[in-house]
Amino acid sequence: QVQLVESGGGLVQPGGSLTLSCAASESDASIAAMGWYRQAPGKTREWVARITSGGDPDYSDSVKGRFSISRDGAKNTVYLQMNSLKPEDTAVYFCNAEGFSGRWYYTRAWGQGTQVTVSL
């Protein structure tokens, strides 16, 4: 099973930027997309963004226009560029690898998570 390792989290002031990386241990043709979720304290995990193996991105309304997801196929790595960060973006960010059933995406693997804190 593919393993995912995130990096790039940290502390940033409101309005600042951070870039998260997610490196997959191997290339797997059954992975249809890779994406990011986040979980704030006391809240359920929420979907943030996804990029398909074909390079098509999609974003939740809460981050659209501020975050950008991209991929480097040669490095099996996905990036999440986060701009104009807000305190409500504070959360543990998880990378995931997804399969596609023909109707919906489903998670095949999770990373361990990386903390992002937006605060003065």
Image (cartoon, helix red, strand yellow):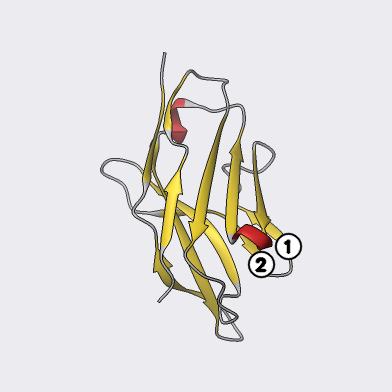
Determine which of the numbered discs, if any, sits on residue 43 in the image.
none
Q: Nearer the viewer, residue 25 or 8?
A: 25
Residue 29 left/right relative to 41: right
Q: Is residue 108 above or below residue 92?
A: below
Where is the N terminus found, in terms of image quarters?
Answer: bottom left
SS label for mark 2: strand
Q: Is residue 10 above or below residue 61?
A: above
Determine which of the numbered discs, if any, sits on residue 56 in the image.
1
Amino acid of disc 2: Thr
Percent position (x, y) of residue 64?
65, 44
Residue density around tag 2, few if under 14, some if 14–19, many if 20 or more, within 10 Å:
some
Where is the C terminus found, in terms of image quarters?
Answer: top left
Instruction: Report which quarter residue 33 is drawn in.
Output: bottom right
Q: Which residue is mark 2?
A: 52
Q: Does residue 60 appear in this view? A: no
Spatial separation of the CA atoms under disc 2 and disc 1: 5 Å
Percent position (x, y) of residue 52?
66, 67
Residue 95 left/right relative to 27: left
State the residue at coordinates (41%, 69%). 109
Q: Nearer the viewer, residue 44 or 10?
A: 10
Residue 70 left/right relative to 9: right
Percent position (x, y) of residue 9?
43, 36
SS label for mark 1: loop
State the residue at coordinates (58%, 45%). 80
State the residue at coordinates (59%, 48%). 79
Q: Does residue 9 appear in this view? A: yes
Quick check: marks 2 and 1 in contact, CB under 8 Å?
A: yes
Outermost top residue: 120
Amino acid of disc 1: Asp
State the residue at coordinates (44%, 72%). 2
Percent position (x, y) of residue 56?
73, 62
Outermost bottom residue: 102
